């Protein structure tokens, strides 16, 4: 219903898990048009009471926006997730934490099939690093906490897709390559909120997917360019009638990579069937992915100086297969009570190959093989010492293989009530969840030889249990995870301007390990904890809001960590588990506060925010290496660590210009003393050990991140834009004592343009890393004696630094057709 000066919009806060834009727009809908949900560019919103209506009308407040002077702004209202369930979303002005969101138009603007690129560009505290060396498998770091696909990385972020936690069961890893980017409706990073359960130490990445009610039309997008990149996506959504809707998205990509042996294949699908009536809504959504990924990982700096595309030991590949089905339902039982539930099942199958140096070597008697020295026997699978079949002078290596097969399932229920309390507006959300996973993990190690291109060629000879005290050999392990949670959150409006939020979540977890080859890995571990939250917001003016909050979160040790936690019996991390001592759960306590605001200007909508945070981890878990044994280590509680910092952002949005700029400062430090092994120069000179003292900075976390981007509409059809990223220096992994030269900072500039040829056809292009800057996003140290430097006549390496090189300058062009 339109009236001069304003437009009424019906807001159903229970429809989505993430940001909701207005359900009705003041402009005509366009086919296959994505919604823009950048919360930093909100128009002013006035909430008024709903008028009495028939049952079919939504039972939520009606929102009205003041018309923007001089321009036809499409008025919208936005809410933000406060819990995994859909109905736990409230007005952003009542969120006692930082608000970070990315919408489909921003994702599309990156031209990337990885949601991490959009998060890095638009969220101040996010930084990406390619530890694996593959652009589809980044480490996403936010405020010093990581969500990584790399097994063995201590995980600090929970990731949700349509309300279902998708951290994999065995090691809490996140397979970003399995998420179809075209199907993402919004991505939010929720902080200071324990309702998101385990692993949300630094927050939760909350992905809301599209369906046929929120997206109608069809789109085909094809792009190609440098390094053999060919990618395409297709999506289609339709409301069949007022009650039924369907949606599907298909994506595929081939990328040859700029490094040797680094080609990848991506294939994934997402679909949704929805039914709704009289405020009730039900969905069945499903997805599959079948991806082959090469991850050449870090490479010695001496090899990079000769060739930027160099690799160090291969094969380094993984095959990821994922399939899942989710059922969701929402019932508006009364005008103030909403009930919803979910049920899900997920299958994950991963196979990895990892070419490595080996500790196997000829014995003092060169006709036999030893492990670790020339006297400790290397055994075969039959328990008999291996004969030496290799030619004299051969450089030995090994191909380590793992198979991880997980089946996860779970159910959850949530209730939301909006009855007034003591005459004041109040929103209560409470719920429960149960998740269980069964994983079968197997590992084997095949001996081989290393060629001058660092390719490990297998010999067909497999290692049995070998080494003293180090153990390597076949592993077969069955694990069972059982996670239960109860949570409640209440937001109470003390006045129209002042709202307080309080509540918490109780987590109960049980992790069981069953060794299939013996008893060394057997274990049964239980963990319980209640995590509280308290916070408040105050709307100082209609255009300025202050917020502050305190919360706690916990992470329980993963089966991988529990299977490799004995310092006296270390293992090849992420592969050859050896024992099952207990580990304590990690507890994080976070406080944050800040200001945010929006203002309508003659040139557009201005949004800004500034805030600070401090998070302290207790009994933090780290992967600690073993001196003199490349790749071997163990997981251990290392005491307390702290991450604190500042985030600031400003943005301007109009029909002609889209602009954003941000700065983030992240200070991450150890709070307890710790002696650890390392291959750093200082450690090598000190018997392989460095001493970390309280106050040392945590490696691999750059302290400063500056981002900026602009897009300008030269004409109605032609847009040009660019973005810039500057990341400061960081300490190398292995330099927790902060004694070595840092990995240098870097600056990257990208350009993009698009031209709307017709209403349905758009062509576009982009240039990444315009100035062809050669930089690295991650650095560590390696054992310079493990393999010879074939590029230097087979002599030893002299420099222990090993880097993950970033992609050089790249050109891409594509076309997008909408129907």
Image (cartoon, helix red, strand yellow):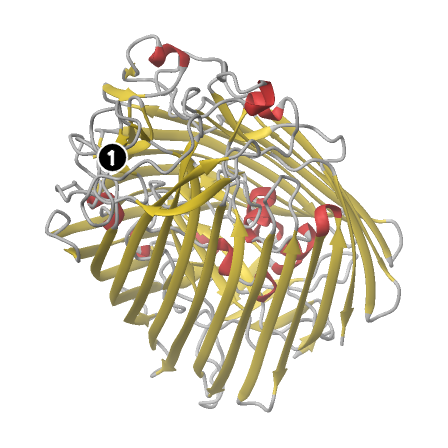
* Quadrant of the snapshot with the N terminus: bottom right
Q: Position of residue 262 (x, y in %)?
A: 59, 45
- On the image, which quarter does residue 169 sit in? bottom left
Q: What element carries label 1?
A: strand
Q: Name the residue under label 1.
A: 634
Q: Position of residue 701 (x, y in %)?
A: 45, 29
Tell me which residue sits at (43%, 70%) in the image. 323
Q: Position of residue 223 (x, y in %)?
A: 74, 58
* Quadrant of the snapshot with the C terminus: bottom right
As displayed, is residue 494 above or below residue 744?
A: below
- On the image, which quarter does residue 684 sit in? top left
Tell me which residue sits at (73%, 75%) in the image. 31
Q: Indicate left or right for 290 with 599 as reference.
A: left
- On the image, which quarter does residue 161 sit in? bottom left
For disc 1, the neighbor class at 10 Å (few under 14, some 14 to 19, many from 20) is many
Q: Which of 231 and 500 is in front in this view?
A: 231
As displayed, is residue 736 above or below residue 70?
A: above
All told, the count of numbered labels is: 1
């Amino acid at each position: 219903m339109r009236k001069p000066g304003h437009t009424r919009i019906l807001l159903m806060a229970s429809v989505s898990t993430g940001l909701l834009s207005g359900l009705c727009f003041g402009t005509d809908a366009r086919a296959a048009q994505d919604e823009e949900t950048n919360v930093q560019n909100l128009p002013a919103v006035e909430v008024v009471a709903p008028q009495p209506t028939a049952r079919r009308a939504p039972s939520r407040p009606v929102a009205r926006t003041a018309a923007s002077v001089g321009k036809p702004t499409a008025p919208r209202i936005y809410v933000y997730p406060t819990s995994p369930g859909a109905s736990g979303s409230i007005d952003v002005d009542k969120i006692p934490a930082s608000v970070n969101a990315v919408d489909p138009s921003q994702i599309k603007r990156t031209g990337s099939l990885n949601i991490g690129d959009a998060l890095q560009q638009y969220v101040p505290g996010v930084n990406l690093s390619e530890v694996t060396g593959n652009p589809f498998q980044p480490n996403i770091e936010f405020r010093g906490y990581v969500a990584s696909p790399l097994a063995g990385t201590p995980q600090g972020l929970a990731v949700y897709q349509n309300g279902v936690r998708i951290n994999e069961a065995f090691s809490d890893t996140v397979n970003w390559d399995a998420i179809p980017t075209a199907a993402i409706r919004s991505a939010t990073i929720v902080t200071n909120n324990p309702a998101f359960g385990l692993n949300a130490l630094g927050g939760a990445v909350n992905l809301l997917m599209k369906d046929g009610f929120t997206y109608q039309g069809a789109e085909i997008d094809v792009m190609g360019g440098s390094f053999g990149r060919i990618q395409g996506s297709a999506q289609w959504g339709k409301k069949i009638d007022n009650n039924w809707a369907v949606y599907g998205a298909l994506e595929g990509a081939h990328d040859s990579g700029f490094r040797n042996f680094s080609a990848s294949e991506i294939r994934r699908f997402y679909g949704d069937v929805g039914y709704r009536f009289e405020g009730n809504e039900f969905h069945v959504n499903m997805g599959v992915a079948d991806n082959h990924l090469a991850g050449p990982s870090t490479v010695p700096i001496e090899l990079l100086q000769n060739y930027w595309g160099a690799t160090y030991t291969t094969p380094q590949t993984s095959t990821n297969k994922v399939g899942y089905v989710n059922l969701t339902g929402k019932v508006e039982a009364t005008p103030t009570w909403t009930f919803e539930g979910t049920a899900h099942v997920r299958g994950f199958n991963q196979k990895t190959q990892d070419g490595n140096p080996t500790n196997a070597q000829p014995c003092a008697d060169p006709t036999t093989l030893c492990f670790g020295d020339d006297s400790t026997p290397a055994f075969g699978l039959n328990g008999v010492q291996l004969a030496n079949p290799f030619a004299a002078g051969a450089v030995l290596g090994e191909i380590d293989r793992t198979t991880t097969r997980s089946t996860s399932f779970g159910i959850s229920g949530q209730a939301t009530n909006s009855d007034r309390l003591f005459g004041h507006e109040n929103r209560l959300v409470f719920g429960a969840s149960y998740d269980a996973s069964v994983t079968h993990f197997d590992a084997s190690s095949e001996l081989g030889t290393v060629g001058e291109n660092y390719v490990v060629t297998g010999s067909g000879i497999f290692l049995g249990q070998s080494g003293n005290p180090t153990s390597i050999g076949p592993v077969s392990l069955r694990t069972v995870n059982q996670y239960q949670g109860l949570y409640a959150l209440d937001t109470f409006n003390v006045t129209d301007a002042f709202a307080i939020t309080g509540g918490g979540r109780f987590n109960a977890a049980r992790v069981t390990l069953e060794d299939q080859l013996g008893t060394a890995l057997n274990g049964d571990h239980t963990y319980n904890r209640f995590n509280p939250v308290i916070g408040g917001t105050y709307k100082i003016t209609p255009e300025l809001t202050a917020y502050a909050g305190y919360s706690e979160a916990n992470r329980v040790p993963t089966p991988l960590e529990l299977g490799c936690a004995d310092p006296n019996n270390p293992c090849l991390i992420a592969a050859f588990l050896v024992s099952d001592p207990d580990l304590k759960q990690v507890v994080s306590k976070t406080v944050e506060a800040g200001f945010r605001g929006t203002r309508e200007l003659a040139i557009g909508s201005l949004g800004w925010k500034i805030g600070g945070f401090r998070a302290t981890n207790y009994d933090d878990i780290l992967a600690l290496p073993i001196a003199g044994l490349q790749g071997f280590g163990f997981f251990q509680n290392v005491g307390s660590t702290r991450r604190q910092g500042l985030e600031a952002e400003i943005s301007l949005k109009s029909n002609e210009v889209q602009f954003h700029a941000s700065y983030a400062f992240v200070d991450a430090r150890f709070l307890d003393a710790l002696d650890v092994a390392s291959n750093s120069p200082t450690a090598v000179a000190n018997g392989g050990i460095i001493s970390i003292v309280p106050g040392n900075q945590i490696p691999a976390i750059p302290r400063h991140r500056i981002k900026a981007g602009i897009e300008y509409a030269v004409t109605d059809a032609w847009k040009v834009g660019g973005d810039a990223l500057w990341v400061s220096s960081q300490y190398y992994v292995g330099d927790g004592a902060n004694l070595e030269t840092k990995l240098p900072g870097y600056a990257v500039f990208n350009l993009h343009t698009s031209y709307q040829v017709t209403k349905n056809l758009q062509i576009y292009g982009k240039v990444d890393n315009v100035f062809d800057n050669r930089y690295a996003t991650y650095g560590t140290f390696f054992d310079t004696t493990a393999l010879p430097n074939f590029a230097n006549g087979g002599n030893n390496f002299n420099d222990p630094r090993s880097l993950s090189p970033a992609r050089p300058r790249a050109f891409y062009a594509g076309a997008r057709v909408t129907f």
